[in-house]
Image: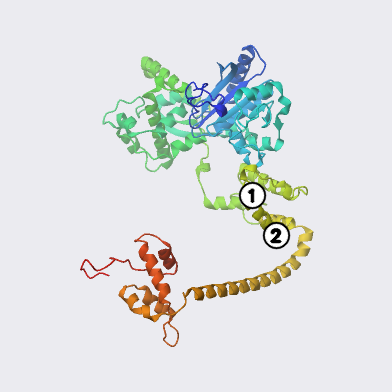
């Protein structure tokens, strides 16, 4: 894959610098570049590459990558020498953040190293810190401005190295080399961008899940020799299609892992892989029917492990069809092991005694984390863990990460409310949101001059919404505020009633002047000939106690003409009558020239 060099200043077809279209990173893919400015040889880059591979192997020894592992290779492109890597993380976004953690640790080990990392969403580190970014930074100009150096997140400002908002990669490296002191470091932005890294490296073992599965002995041997092959096998099962399943559905299929000589062993997954395999509904192939029928009916656990092993074995069957050409290294190693077994036969398979000596062979983790209980969810919203009762235990989330997120949010609100220096001038307005129309600006200035902002009232409202205790002054003013608010509400309602009466009087005067409220009974026959139901409906609605009908036939005629001009489509007259709960009939013909009696 070609990396995104100078993507912010990419030449277009027709430009002199255009040399063809560049490929963009694939979906669910993270790309990273490592630079050492000022170095003339490749020796330093090779040293860093070896150290990075060794560090990744040490941290992820037992970890299972969803698709691709962390990788680096030396590249020379556009006159630049650097280390480049691309990793497809699929459905497991934790792979992406594990790579960010590795890159940050690597930048601490090598102080001269500058790291840039991005994905298909762009600068995803800034997306994490979107709420605290400066107003001058936007998705349109943030390309090549975000760097990791010595464990810190640094930003290249707009006026550094380029006069325009677009910053090519070469210009960014020029700024880093010549003026590194001009880069911006914000602890708040860094904390938000690296928030997910706080759980590493402890997150690596906690993301794994062990489950017991009843599988063929041959597959147990493959999994013990290449445990990381579980990722491509699970993906093969998860993304299966009818064409790939066709060989397995034959009456006498030629299976690589036939369902015989079954053993129950513990298999290591990531939680994402386990959920993908466990949650799938799969009808067993014909070859597995005898094994399922022979399972004891009174042992639900044994049957569940057999069904789970059926899915796992099917995934490896699908993987074996193209394992020798698979892009995943573990899958290709499975193909080599199968070739060796084909030569050695079943003599190379482990015995039951050997299987018992395997590490964690009987381990089975609790998978209740897959369950979604709405009552537990409500308890977490209330700050209580599962099993806690009101008034007992003092609350706190059962999930440490959820509790940390809530404490983080509350601390931000408290910091804002307790910041006496934060006032109206703290709200920054983006220049892009301003209107260039001078007349509208003058009108808005006149309107805004009557608008005031009560900071104390806003702070009090925010404290009430967040459930924070009120201040002492607020408690003393609470009683007075209620009485004042009651008087203000009554006065406001009285003013509104007076305004409505004035408005109704003005409307009545205008309608009288236009003749809309004059009674013209001579129009009655014309309305009757039109066949409209609106006359009778209006008459019933406006009939007073004396039985007299008060209908403005001029207004009714105008409404009918307007409705007729709509031609059966939506229009003002039809919409107005619908809002009033009335349905006008369609005019079937303009005249009765056709002789059919319609009018």
Does residue 590 appear anywhere in the picture?
A: yes
The tag on residue 219 is none
Which residue was labeled with disc 1?
438
Answer left or right for 89 relative to 203. left
From the viewer's perspective, is residue 133 above or below residue 593? above
Residue name at image x 30 percent, y 75 percent: 529
The spot of residue 169 in percent (x, y) is 60, 24
From the viewer's perspective, is residue 503 above or below residue 326? below
From the viewer's perspective, is residue 33 above or below residue 487? above
Asked which secondary structure carries label 1, the reply is helix
Which residue was labeled with disc 2?
450
Does residue 387 appear anywhere in the picture?
A: no
Q: Residues within 10 Å of mark 1 (few under 14, many from 20)?
A: few
The spot of residue 41 in percent (x, y) is 63, 11
Query: For this rendering, which residue is in front, 220 or 130?
Result: 130
The spot of residue 492 in percent (x, y) is 66, 70
The spot of residue 315 in percent (x, y) is 40, 30
Query: For this rendering, which residue is in front, 154 or 139?
Result: 139
- Say which quarter of the image contains residue 501: bottom right
The quadrant of the rendering that contains the C terminus is: bottom left
Residue name at image x 42 percent, y 69 percent: 581
Q: Residues within 10 Å of mark 2 (few under 14, many from 20)?
A: few
Q: Residue furthest left?
A: 595
Tell me whether circle 2 and circle 1 mark residues in contact (CB < 8 Å): no
Residue name at image x 37 percent, y 67 percent: 561
Query: For this rendering, which residue is in front, 353 or 566?
Result: 566
The answer for how far apart the CA atoms under marks 2 and 1 are is: 19 Å
From the viewer's perspective, is residue 451 above or below residue 432? below
Residue name at image x 59 percent, y 28 percent: 117
Q: Residue furthest bottom?
A: 546
């Amino acid at each position: 894959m070609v990396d995104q060099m100078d993507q912010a200043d990419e030449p277009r077809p027709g430009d002199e610098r255009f040399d063809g279209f560049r490929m963009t990173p694939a979906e669910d893919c993270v790309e990273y570049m490592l630079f050492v400015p000022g170095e003339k040889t490749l020796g330093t880059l090779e040293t860093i590459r070896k150290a990075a591979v060794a560090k990744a192997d040490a941290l992820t020894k037992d970890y299972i990558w969803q698709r691709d592992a962390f990788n680096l290779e030396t590249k020379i492109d556009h006159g630049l020498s650097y280390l480049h890597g691309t990793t497809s993380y699929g459905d497991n976004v934790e792979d992406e953040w594990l790579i960010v953690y590795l890159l940050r640790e690597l930048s601490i080990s090598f102080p001269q190293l500058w790291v840039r990392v991005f994905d298909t969403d762009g600068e995803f580190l800034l997306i994490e810190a979107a709420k605290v970014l400066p107003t001058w930074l936007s998705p349109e100009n943030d390309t090549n401005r975000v760097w990791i150096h010595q464990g810190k997140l640094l930003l290249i400002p707009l006026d550094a190295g380029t006069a325009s908002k677009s910053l090519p990669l070469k210009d960014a490296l020029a700024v880093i080399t010549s003026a590194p002191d001009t880069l911006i470091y914000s602890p708040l932005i860094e904390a938000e961008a690296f928030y997910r890294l706080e759980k590493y490296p402890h997150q690596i073992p906690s993301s794994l899940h062990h489950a017991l599965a009843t599988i063929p002995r041959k597959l147990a041997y493959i999994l013990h020799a290449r445990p990381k092959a579980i990722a491509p096998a699970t993906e093969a099962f998860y993304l299966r299609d009818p064409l790939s399943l066709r060989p397995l559905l034959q009456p006498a299929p030629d299976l690589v892992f036939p369902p015989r000589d079954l053993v129950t062993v513990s298999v290591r997954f990531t939680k994402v892989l386990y959920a993908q395999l466990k949650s799938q509904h799969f009808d067993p192939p014909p070859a597995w029917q005898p094994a399922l029928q022979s399972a004891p009916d009174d042992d639900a656990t044994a049957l569940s492990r057999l069904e789970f092993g059926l899915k796992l074995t099917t995934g490896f069957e699908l993987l074996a069809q193209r394992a020798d050409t698979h892009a995943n290294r573990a899958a290709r190693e499975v193909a080599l092991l199968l070739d060796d077994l084909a030569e050695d036969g079943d003599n190379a398979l482990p015995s039951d005694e050997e299987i018992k000596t395997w590490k964690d062979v009987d381990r089975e983790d609790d998978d209740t984390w897959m369950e979604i209980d709405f009552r537990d969810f409500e308890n977490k919203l209330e700050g209580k863990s599962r099993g806690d009762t009101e008034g007992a235990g003092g609350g706190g989330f059962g999930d440490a990460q959820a509790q940390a997120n809530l404490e983080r949010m509350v601390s931000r609100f408290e910091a804002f409310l307790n910041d006496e220096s934060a006032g109206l001038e703290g709200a920054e307005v983006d220049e892009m949101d301003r209107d260039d129309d001078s007349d509208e600006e003058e009108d808005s200035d006149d309107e805004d001059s009557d608008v005031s902002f009560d900071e104390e009232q806003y702070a009090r409202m925010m404290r009430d919404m967040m459930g924070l205790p009120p201040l002492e002054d607020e408690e003393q003013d609470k009683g007075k505020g209620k009485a004042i608010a009651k008087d203000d509400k009554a006065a406001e309602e009285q003013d509104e009633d007076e305004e409505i009466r004035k408005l109704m009087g003005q409307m009545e005067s205008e309608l009288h002047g236009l003749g809309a409220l004059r009674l013209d009974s001579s129009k009655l026959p014309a309305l009757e000939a039109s066949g409209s139901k609106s006359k009778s409906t209006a008459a019933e609605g406006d009939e007073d106690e004396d039985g007299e009908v008060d209908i403005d036939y001029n207004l009714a005629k105008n409404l009918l003409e307007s409705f007729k001009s709509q031609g059966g489509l939506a229009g003002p007259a039809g919409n107005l009558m619908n809002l009033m709960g009335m349905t006008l009939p369609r005019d079937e013909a303009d005249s009765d020239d056709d002789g059919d009696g319609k009018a």
